[in-house]
Image: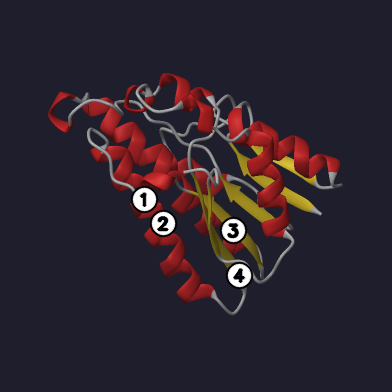
Amino acid sequence: MKIAITGTTKGIGKALKEEFEKSGYTVIEINRNIYDFEKPISMCDINLENIEVLINNAGHELGLGRSYEEMMVNDIVSQVNVNLLVPMLLTHTYVKQNKSGTVINITSGIVDDLRENSTTYYTTKCGLSKFTKAARQDLKDRFRFIEVRPRRINTDFHKTSKASHTRNSNFLIEPIEVAKIILDIANNPYISDITIKDHRR
């Protein structure tokens, strides 16, 4: 089986690549070193034919931890492009090129837990969450749409995010554990949405 994953160079994406390859999948990597995520329209030119699963994982938090008025305009635009427009257009390409399949959109626990100084990040992840729901409604006869909301994952995102420095680092989930769960989700037709979090929180 073939699977396409965005953002496989580190964190959850890297763990996803390794876990799916161990399970016999051929992984197509869609990363910024090859594709320009700042130009979302370029996603329409990617060949996704005969891909069973598309995982929209790539995202970033530039500006997270700053009040909205202090954010750089370029960071706002970049978050909207990478966190929302790229997944939407890549998904559009995918459903146009295939008769059926599965789309897994990785959002964030922030969708359920709005925090201070996270306006743009929160907005883009909520947008991706709503997009997943709406696309599922439109295409439910041919495609599965799944939202995964990871909370408190031990990645560079957590380490660099100003918004997370005061939180208890003892309750972080390793990316490989998230990847294993997403592999199960991809192979389980009865799961639609799931939040991944430490049971102690």
Horizontal and vertical percent for residue 183?
A: 72, 51
N-terminal of the two: label 3 or label 2? 3
Q: Earlier in the sequence, mark 1 or mark 3?
A: 3
Does residue 19 appear left or right of residue 158 in this picture?
Answer: right
Instruction: Give the residue pinned by disc 4.
Output: 143
Three-letter residue code for mark 3: Val
Q: Position of residue 18 (x, y in %)?
A: 76, 35
Q: Residue at x 42, y 38 (%)?
A: 82
* Badge 4: residue crowd in 10 Å (few <14, some 14–19, many ≥20): some
Q: Which residue lies furthest to the left in this view?
A: 69
The residue sitting at 23% across, 25% down in the picture is 66
Give residue 103's mark: 3
Residue at mark 2: 129
Per the model, the C-alpha gap separating discs 2 and 4 is: 16 Å
Query: Can residue 51 be seen in this snapshot?
Result: no
Instruction: Name the amino acid type tagged 2.
Output: Ser
According to the image, label 1 marks what residue? 111
**Callouts 4 and 1 close, C-beta under 8 Å:** no
Instruction: Select label 2 or label 4 by which is in front.
Output: 2
> Closer to the observer: label 4 or label 1?
1
Q: What residue type is labelled 1?
A: Val
Marks 3/4: CA–CA distance = 7 Å
Does dot 2 land on a helix, a strand or a loop?
A: helix
